[in-house]
Image (cartoon, rainbow, N blue to C red):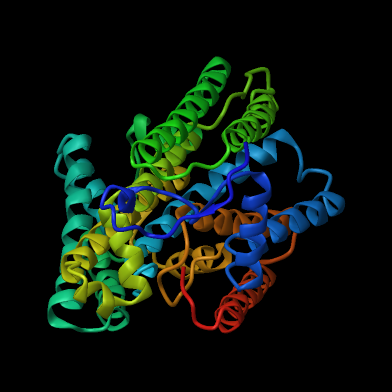
Amino acid sequence: MTVSTTTNAGPDPVAGDLIGSGVEGGVGDQIGAWWQRVRSGDMGALPAVGGLVVLTILFASLSPFFLTERNFANLLNQAATLVMLGMALVFVLLLGEIDLSAGVTGGVAMALFVVLNAQFGLPWPLALLIGFGFGIATGALIGFFVARVGIPSFVVTLGLFLGYQGLALLIIGSGGLFRLEVPELIALQNGNLPPWAGWAMLIVILLVSGGTSFWDRARRRRAGVPNRTIALVWAKLAVIAVIGGIAVFILNQNRGQSIVAVEGVPIIVPIVLAILWIGTFMLDRTKFGRYIYAIGGNAEAARRSGVKVRWVKWWAFVICSSLAVVSALFSVSRVGSVDATVGRDIVLSGVAAAVVGGVSLFGGRGRLMHAAIGALVIAVITNGLGLLNLGAGINLMVTGAVLILAATVDALSRLRGNGVRT
């Protein structure tokens, strides 16, 4: 039965804790509500998804190697670092803030890790833990200056962006380079799951996605709030099963060029998906996540309604810096070495990934998945232009043009939406 009901934030405090589109009901209601949001300027990741499809068709027609299983696996490994950094930056962009030091924070953390492990003989788990501790401390430091002192995040993080480049030079030494000697960390970007594990991963994804959807429905039902039609849940699971099944099947093909088989889903894929799910759960289903959106929409209104704005900002910067360290770890695992330039050039690409995916620079709008899609768009551009033997200059020009286009779409959509933030 189709139920057409518009659900607003009700006085029931339980209902206020529930996730929902704001318009529950059948398939027609959802499509109508989505189209209404697009017309009002909230296009989400629609332009990025469209761009991803167009770029895929374009590069597939120009290069016979683009749609091979080997390049598909390479693309996923290539995109992982940027996906993680883009997701890290979403937490502060949603507040209307920015962290220009995210890249170099990860770089200094990796410098600390590799020097403590290689030069001082510290066990690698402990050295890595100290690296993450540095990331957490940096996030807390930025949060202090932004939330307590009131300095704009652009200024604070620009200062750290410059200062941490010097700190990395002091730790590693000018021209210094350390090889990554930890097999477990090297495998992050260079290892693959056994073929059976790829199918097991897909089953886990379906169980978690289905379980989360039915848990949401049960909570809404207990609170007396209307649910979307159950057909939407089954449709979502079917789409995940089909797309995920195709991806696992392709990645399980032998893509090696010697007698040694190279097959299976890259190890980095389930790690990124797990962090994506945890972060999305945090933003969509916890008070902390709702407070981030509320502050990004109107910080003063959030403060007057009792939200502890300072603490939320503080923790958002801590999460951002911590995930930036994860991103740097992925980068180091892929390259196999650490020098003083790690993380120096990637932060603007991370911001670009989030904006291209549909995260608003003005705060209050966007999701982690949007940043992941935006990062894939940029990775496809880099990968496709590389296959066409076009230089880094063309790559930077194209990426910059895509970023300007995405920022223009964001600004125009806000004008069209008459300043209404969702």
Quarter residue 26 falls in: top right
Where does the image place residue 104, in percent across and percent down from the top left?
33, 65
Where does the image place residue 263, in percent across and percent down from the top left?
62, 23
Quarter residue 225 falls in: top left
Quarter residue 281 falls in: top left
Residue 176 visible at all: no
Q: Residue at x 65, y 35 (%)?
A: 239
Residue 419 visible at all: yes
**Given the current orientation, which residue lies at the most extreme right position?**
61
Q: Is residue 202 left or right of residue 401?
A: left
Q: Which one is in front, 415 or 129?
A: 415
Q: Is residue 396 above or below residue 268?
A: below
Q: Is residue 269 above or below residue 291?
A: above
Q: Which one is in front, 302 or 15?
A: 15
Q: Which one is in front, 351 or 315?
A: 315
Q: Residue at x 32, y 81 (%)?
A: 154
| Quadrant position of the N terminus in the picture | top right
Q: How many marks?
A: 0
Q: Is residue 134 left or right of residue 2?
A: left
Q: Is residue 117 left or right of residue 15?
A: left
Q: Residue at x 39, y 63 (%)?
A: 89
Q: Which one is in front, 103 or 313?
A: 313
Where does the image place residue 373, in percent across and percent down from the top left?
57, 54
